[in-house]
Image (cartoon, helix red, strand yellow):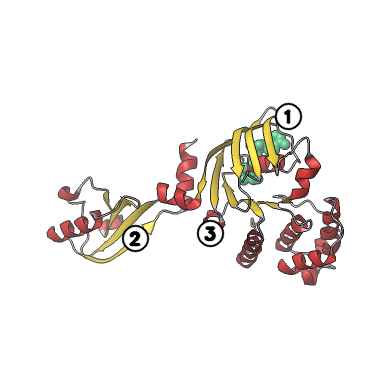
Amino acid sequence: MAPIISIRNLTKTYSNGFQALKGIDLDIERGEILALLGPNGAGKTTMISIVCGIANPSGGSVIVGGHDVVTEFRATRAMIGLVPQELTTDLFETVWNTVSFSRGLHGKKPNPAHIERVLRDLSLWDKKDNMLRQLSGGMKRRVLIAKALSHEPEILFLDEPTAGVDVTLRKDMWHVVERLRANGVTIILTTHYIEEAEEIADRVGVINGGRLLLVEEKKALMAKLGRKQLILDLAEPLEAVPPCLDGNGLSLGPNGTTLIYDFDAEHEQSSIAVLLSRLSAEGIHFKDLSTRQSSLEDIFVSLVGESK
Ligand SMILES: Nc1ncnc2c1ncn2[C@@H]1O[C@H](COP(=O)(O)OP(=O)(O)OP(=O)(O)O)[C@@H](O)[C@H]1O
Ligand SMILES: [Mg+2]
């Protein structure tokens, strides 16, 4: 099946001459959840704004559902819901009116039952008659999500939806996202909470300096780049790694009380067994052992660090 979003050699140079995107190529499949990670200023919001038709590309093309985002803006915009990073909403309007009006803006007929469902899903129902200025920051964020869902989009962009949001609300939001995914909605989100991407995304893209450094299935990425560590709590501290075991991915932890063995999770077969028997032959005993797998965060930090 053709990708629902197809981005080719996308560039963006702002009017002050700053080049925010330097040739992005990306296909997004229907129904997937793609997390875009990248440091501040990487170009995430710029890219999203172009796909949503609120900023113009300087070069390249973006096709959404078979339509060009520049020449067929109305068709592509109707397919997309955007939860923007910045709050941009009339504070003197009620929740109900704001969300209903947003549906109308996208050319959809009124559907109070749908609006009610969206507000209930986001725990905003009891605030529906409140003006936005009467809501807390986290509730205003929920209103942005409700607006983005008001016209039943096939594609949802969430640009840092959980920045500054408490843990409970964040969990609520991810339940909503999961329900949307179950209904076939394609979801692209940016986040600085990498554990969020780790939990929820099918694929992960990393952007830095206007370039897409990689985009890959999350599981494959973690298997490929992820390292594993075996950590042994020693019965007696060591001053150094014994020479006969040196050069085998072993290092000592603080105070020499732990021995850390770095290994490649994909290719590990029998080296742990060999290591343990050699330690025992050396008279090195341990009280406890545990393993640790590197997280998406470790992978992200090392990728972004390398690309500087
Ligand atoms: N209107 C503008 N004019 C000039 N430069 C801009 C404009 N908007 C953004 N930029 C620059 O483009 C770069 C990318 O910005 P963008 O907002 O896309 O980053 P981001 O990845 O979304 O960052 P964050 O994680 O902080 O939201 C930044 O260096 C920013 O200063
Ligand atoms: Mg941004």
For marks 2 and 3, the one nearer the N-term is 3
Front residue of this view, candidates 196 and 205: 205
Image: 235 above or below 62: below
For marks 1 and 3, the one nearer the N-term is 1
Q: Position of residue 97 (x, y in %)?
A: 86, 61
Residue in the image at 70% along x and 44% along y = 65
In front: label 2 or label 3: 3
The answer for how far apart the CA atoms under marks 1 and 3 are is 38 Å
Query: Which amino acid, mark 3?
Result: Glu
Numbered disc 2: secondary structure: strand
Numbered marks: total: 3
Asked if residue 64 can be seen in this view, the reply is: yes
Reading the image, the residue beneath label 1 is 15
Numbered disc 1: secondary structure: loop
Query: Which amino acid, mark 2?
Result: Thr
Numbered disc 3: secondary structure: helix
Report which quarter residue 211 is drawn in. Answer: top right
Front residue of this view, candidates 90 and 272: 272
Residue in the image at 87% along x and 57% along y = 109
How would you rate the neighbour count of disc 1 (Cα within 10 Å): few for under 14, some for 14-19, many for 20 or more?
few
Reading the image, the residue beneath label 3 is 199
In the image, 126: left or right of 292? right
Q: Is mark 1 within 8 Å of ligand 1?
A: yes
In front: label 2 or label 1: 2
Reading the image, the residue beneath label 2 is 291
Query: Which amino acid, mark 1?
Result: Ser
How would you rate the neighbour count of disc 3 (Cα within 10 Å): few for under 14, some for 14-19, many for 20 or more?
few
Report which quarter residue 164 is drawn in. Answer: bottom right
Residue in the image at 78% along x and 38% along y = 72
Ligand 2, by image quadrant, is top right
For marks 2 and 1, the one nearer the N-term is 1
